[in-house]
Image (tube, rainbow, N blue to C red):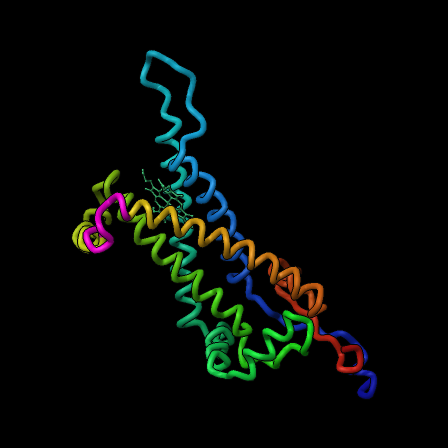
């Protein structure tokens, strides 16, 4: 068996159950946030005209946007916990080492231009992927802060009352409520650009890497191709 070992495709666990669940819950909440957010920005549907005050479509749209916002925030907090404190996620942190290697950058760009092999990675992500994810987390952080500032103006109790002072400072720093809304809106487009690039890169890696990249975010497993088959 020993000498035939290298002929078989092996599998390894790429993503933990938490990672996969958080990815998909976050994915659906962000898609819903984009759609409901654009509805808040431009209410393209209006309820039937009724003399009674029952047509609360816009208010309902905003309520569901806020619910999805809090689901996204809870996934964000969970992911932060995993990133900093869970041992099995250390692979992500190790990726930062490659950021300072010019060779890894050149090889990675060459790989996407189909002129060089994929570099050996120190951690879970390649350099371009890591930069894209850092941009995503930066955008999400500001979407959460600006989202909470907007929410503070429609709900004043509970932990929003507790956050009122720091959020008011931030609101002033951002240039007032109108600017906060503008920043929240512009960042939404940043997220849309990220999603397009992310899906393109995932499909690219699935086709050229032949390791089951797209499968892995559902099943958790990736395939290791034997050296002789590469
Ligand atoms: C990926 C995350 C998010 C996206 C893509 C997103 C998108 C949007 C967009 C496009 C708008 C309309 C802005 C405009 O009027 O031009 C909006 C409004 C709003 N968002 Fe978000 N949002 C996100 C996260 C959040 C979070 C975490 C909260 C906090 C609970 C939140 C709370 C709000 C509120 C309260 C409004 C309504 C502002 C108003 O009534 O004018 N959002 N969002």
Q: Residue at x 53, y 68 (%)?
A: 129
- The quarter in which the C terminus is drawn is bottom right
Report if residue 41 lies within the magenta region: no
Give residue 184's position: percent from left, percent from top: 35, 48
Report if residue 173 lies within the magenta region: yes
Q: Does 186 appear above or below 56? A: below
Task: Decide which of 108, 144 is in the foreground and name it.
Answer: 108
Q: Does 179 appear above or below 19? A: above
Q: Does 107 appear above or below 201? A: below
Q: Which residues are magenta?
A: 171-179
Give residue 134's position: percent from left, percent from top: 44, 66
Give residue 115's position: percent from left, percent from top: 68, 75
Give residue 195's position: percent from left, percent from top: 53, 54
Task: Decide which of 115, 213 is in the foreground and name it.
Answer: 115
Q: Residue at x 35, y 31 (%)?
A: 59
Using the rendered view, name the quadrant where residue 17 is placed.
Answer: bottom right
Task: Decide which of 68, 145 is in the foreground and name it.
Answer: 145
Question: Is 13 left or right of 154, judged from the image as shown?
Answer: right
Task: Decide which of 75, 136 is in the foreground and name it.
Answer: 136
Q: Residue at x 19, y 47 (%)?
A: 161
Instruction: Report the predominant secondary structure element of the magenta stretch.
Output: helix
């Amino acid at each position: 068996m020993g000498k035939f070992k290298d002929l078989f495709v092996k599998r390894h666990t790429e993503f933990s159950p938490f990672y996969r669940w958080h990815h998909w819950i976050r994915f659906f909440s962000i898609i819903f946030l984009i759609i409901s957010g654009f509805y808040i920005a431009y209410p393209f549907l209006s309820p039937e005209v009724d003399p009674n005050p029952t047509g609360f479509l816009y208010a309902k749209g905003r309520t569901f946007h806020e619910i999805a916002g809090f689901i996204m925030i809870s996934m964000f907090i969970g992911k932060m916990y995993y990133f900093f404190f869970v041992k099995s996620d250390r692979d992500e942190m190790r990726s930062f080492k490659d950021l300072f290697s010019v060779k890894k950058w050149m090889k990675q760009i060459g790989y996407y231009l189909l002129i060089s092999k994929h570099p050996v990675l120190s951690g879970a992500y390649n350099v371009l992927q890591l930069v894209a994810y850092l941009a995503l987390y930066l955008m999400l952080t500001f979407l959460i802060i600006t989202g909470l500032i907007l929410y503070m103006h429609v709900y004043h109790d509970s932990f929003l009352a507790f956050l009122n002072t720091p959020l008011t400072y931030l609101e002033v720093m951002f240039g007032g409520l109108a600017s906060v809304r503008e920043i929240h809106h512009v960042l939404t487009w940043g997220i849309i650009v990220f999603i397009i690039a992310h899906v393109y890169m995932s499909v690219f890696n699935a086709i050229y890497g032949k390791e089951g990249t797209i499968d892995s975010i559902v099943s958790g497993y990736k395939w290791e191709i034997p050296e002789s088959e590469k």
